[in-house]
Structure formats: C-alpha cells, structure tokens
Amino acid sequence: ILTVGLSYVLAALNIPYPLDNSFLINIPDDVVSNLAFPDFSKVMKSDFIVAVAAITLIASIESLLSIKAIDKLDPQSRRSNVNKDLKALGLATTLSGFLGGLNVVTVIARSSVNVNNGATNRSANFLHALFLVVFVLLFQDQLRKIPLAALAAILVYTGYKLATPKTINKISKIGKEQTVIFLVTLISTLFTNLITGISAGIVVTFIIHAIINKDVGFFLSHVAKPNVLLFKEKDGDNYYVSVKYFCTFINFYKLKSKLDVIPENEDVILDFSLCNFVDDTVMEGLDNYTETFTKKGGSIEIIGLDKHETDSHHPFAIRKILPLDKLKPIERYFTKRQSLLESTASDFSLSYRAQKNTDTGFLSDFVFFRTREIPYTYNTLSEENQRYMLFDVEFTEGAFIAKEVVKTTVMHINLDCDIPVFTLDKEGLLGFKYSLAGFKDIIIDKHPDFNKRFFLSGGNTNEIQSLFNDELILFLESHPYYHIESNGSSLLILKKERLLSVQEVKAMLYFGQQFYRLVQKGQKQL
C-alpha cells in the first residue's frame, strides 16, 4: 500500500519511479495470452524429479499444518477430511500446472483471516480467489509498482517467526531432545533444502528415541506389529483403546485411524499401560483430539502413564518405561490422571498417596489374587483409619514366556464386624470358571432377576442368603456390575482388569461406600 501510494505521489510530481522494472512485480499486459503450457521434455531428468518431489512435499506439509491449525480455530469444532483435502489440492495443482500456474496449497494466513471475519464454509476461499483474479485483471498497474523486496521481506519475516528465540525456548520446555531435533532440522534446511532438512530431522529424531530407550531393536521389532486395540465396552457407554509396545511419530497413524472412527460426542478411555514409549508428537496429537472431543460433548481420558518416567513437566514431554525404572519412584511427575485422583480424594475426604506400597499380603486372602504375584500397589486413596482404600495394583499371571503383567484398580474395605465369605460376579464366563473350580451358585429366593444376572458363591449358604436381603439386592440390581469378594473381615471390589478412569474411580468409591453401609446394616440385623 505504501509503495503504490508513493508511486502516485511521484507521478504527480513528475518524478520518475526510482526502481527499475527488474525489481518490481512483473505482470504481462495480456494474462490469458501469456499462459504457459507444460513442457514435458525434462520429465525423466533428475532436476525435474527433485523439483517435483520438493514442491509436492512442501505443499503437502504446509497444507497439513494449515488444516490442523484451522481446525483449532473453527468455532464449530469441525474436523477436516485431510485425505479429501489432499486429493483436491493434488487435482487443483495438476490443473494449475497445465495452465502455467503454481502449485495450490492451503495457507494459514488466508484461512485464519477468513475465520476471524466470520467465514464458515468453502465459499470464503472461492471469493478470495475471485477477488485475486479481479485484482490481476483490473489493477495491473498498481500491482506492478510493488517491489519484489517487499514480498521478500514478508517471506523473511514469516520464516523468522518460525524460529524466533521465543519459539526455541518454547520447544526446549518440552524436552532437551526437542531443541536438538529443531536445530538440526533448521540448520540442515538453511544449508541444503527443505527435503534434506526434514529428512535429517526425522533421522535424528529416530536416533534420539533409540538412545533414550537404549534399544534400537525394540522399535525395529515392533514397528510393523498391530499395536492398537479398539472396542466398545459392553457394560458401559465408553470406547476403550489400548496401545502396546510404543507410540511415536512412526506409528501414530495407527492410533489416529482408530480415534477417527469414534464419534466425537462419545467417551473414550485411552490406555497406555502396555506401552513403554510415547513421544511428544503423540502427546500433542492426543491433546488436540481431547480438545475436539470436549467441544463436541465427548471426552478422552488417558490412563496408564502414571509409571512412565519423563524429564520435563511439560504435558507433551516424552514418556518412557526403561528396564530399571521399576526401581525408581513413580511420583516424580504427576500425570493429569494423578492430579485428578488427588482432587477426587479431597472431594471424598480421603488422603492420596502416589508412592508404591509393597505391603500387599492382605490381598492374597481373596480368590481373585490367590494365584497371582503382586509386587506393589500405587496411587492409593484412603481414609485416615485405612478402612477404605482404593488403589492401582500391578500383578502378574502365568509363568515364563506366558507371564503377563496386568494393571487394574481395586477397592479394599475393612469391615467392623465379620460377615460370611462370598464371591459375587456377573453371570457369564467368570461365573462359569468359578463353577468349574467347585463354587456353586447360591440361589436367593424371590429374586429371579438377581439369580439370572449374578453368580453368587460361598461356603455358608444360609448366612449368605440372610446377608443378601431385599435392600442389598435392589442396590446391586440398580448399579453397574462389580466383582465383589468377602474374606470374612474385609471386602474387595473390582470392576475391570484394567486401570480405571477418574470418573470410574468416583463411581467405584460411591458404590463401595454404599455397599459397605448396606452390608454392615444387614449383618447387624441378623
């Protein structure tokens, strides 16, 4: 605007424009007749192939980054169809090339201006292109007065904003390794080209991950294996996603493909308890997914990272479990789940302790843990007198090559008076296993629905039938299924053989407290 205005001032004063045409934007007088049609004579030349690959890579990366940024800005919280957008850009670039035009890309500047000015659909981009054509056709003289140096300054400033000291400092807060990766990519790009720079960054990232994990074979042996399991839990409305081995920029697409099929108004439990290594790319990507799901009325709760070590407090920092990490404390850096568990403990007037507790002998009295090895519990919520305790527990089942590590969340309640020994579970496969082990299903008179839905077993049938009165049975029938055991002096409550989300922890605490109250009340009436 300044240079165009200055050109009119100089013309009014009869002063020649100080810049030669070689320093100004060059627009032909007849745009249509000057269209350059493609020349395929260099199709098989190396310089042509390199140029095409570079343009394709640059355009695709810039478009993907812009699409990701615009999704965050969209007030309607819509998620772009990236595959569809890339196909459209490829087709548009092909048509543009046949007319002598440049490649077509999605740019953040135009899109952000559109969003900030109330644009909500694709017509904004069409009108932008229409205005651009009008300017080229009707305001050629004004455009020819703009110096190329002004455009170069814009590009230099834009590039500087991508690598300012503030940006580098922001990246370093994620982790020291991120600074190394960023600087290697930046320097390689400046001294070579973008493709070489990005390639160098990818190679350095993989090397750093291998060094951190101290085992390059771990990545190579599992990279091709399916590591993401998705299903909708039958006894709840949430989707459960379990990730194994590792999850980094190399295989994040596997997790993304699963999350993309879940409606954004649903609740998702994302479990990393079987995953040994999670990088910053995954953590940042999941943060974006969480934000999108929250805006649409759903939620994503990440569990299973409480034992993972990290070198930074940043939420995107690398999370890892190394062979000797089991000897280290787990409370060095709280995860979001641990912080919410601490808040939950306060809401229920309980204390919270993240540290490991190797005193697990009290669990061996229960049938569920009788043949399982329990090294420790952690993330304990408890009353001051230890009557109620809810905690995460890690145990192993099987032996040698069949040995499997399982993490789950259980509640333990010490009783004021002794009650009959019993086991209560949902009628089904587990009940069938108990029947094979010699446990018989106890029938409660006048409660056919309860007998059909639950498997109740124990030694003293008469005492158990007396304990399960109408009030207790009505309570059980109106709540979700839990595995409940009594060893005579205490109760064990378990919902799933996995770590529970914070919402599920709250539900278990409420259920356990109410069940304890009804059991004690019923026992005192006997």
Image (cartoon, grey):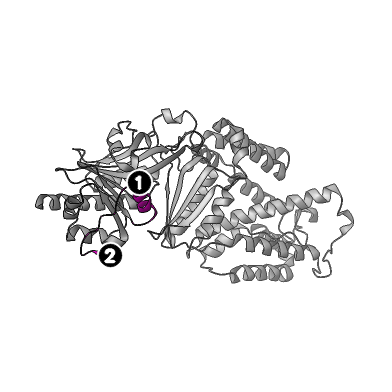
Number of disc labels: 2
Q: Is residue 478 visible?
A: no
Q: Is residue 4 visible?
A: yes
Residue holding disc 1:
437
Residue 96: percent from left, percent from top:
75, 64
The residue drawn where x is 87% and y is 58% is 40
Q: Is residue 77 above or below residue 19?
A: below
Furthest residue to the right? Answer: 41
Q: Nearer the viewer, mark 1 or mark 2?
A: 1
Would you say residue 86 sits in the magenta stretch?
Answer: no
Segment colored magenta: 427-447
Residue holding disc 2:
449
Amino acid type for the residue under numbered disc 2? Asp
Amino acid type for the residue under numbered disc 1? Ala
Q: Residues within 10 Å of mark 2 (few under 14, many from 20)?
A: few
Residue 413: percent from left, percent from top:
23, 43
Q: Residues within 10 Å of mark 1 (few under 14, many from 20)?
A: few
The numbered disc on residue 279 is none
Q: Is the N terminus in the top left, top right, bottom left or bottom right quadrant?
A: bottom right
Camera-nearest residue between 408 and 10? 408
Residue 282: percent from left, percent from top:
53, 46
The residue drawn where x is 45% and y is 30% is 325
CA distance for labels 1 and 2: 24 Å
Q: Residues at badges 1 and 2 in contact (C-beta under 8 Å)?
A: no
Question: Picture quarter containing residue 389?
Answer: top left
Label 2 secondary element: helix
Q: Main secondary structure of the magenta part?
A: loop
Q: Earlier in the sequence, mark 1 or mark 2?
A: 1
The residue drawn where x is 36% and y is 42% is 338
Would you say residue 437 sits in the magenta stretch?
Answer: yes
Residue 390: percent from left, percent from top:
29, 43
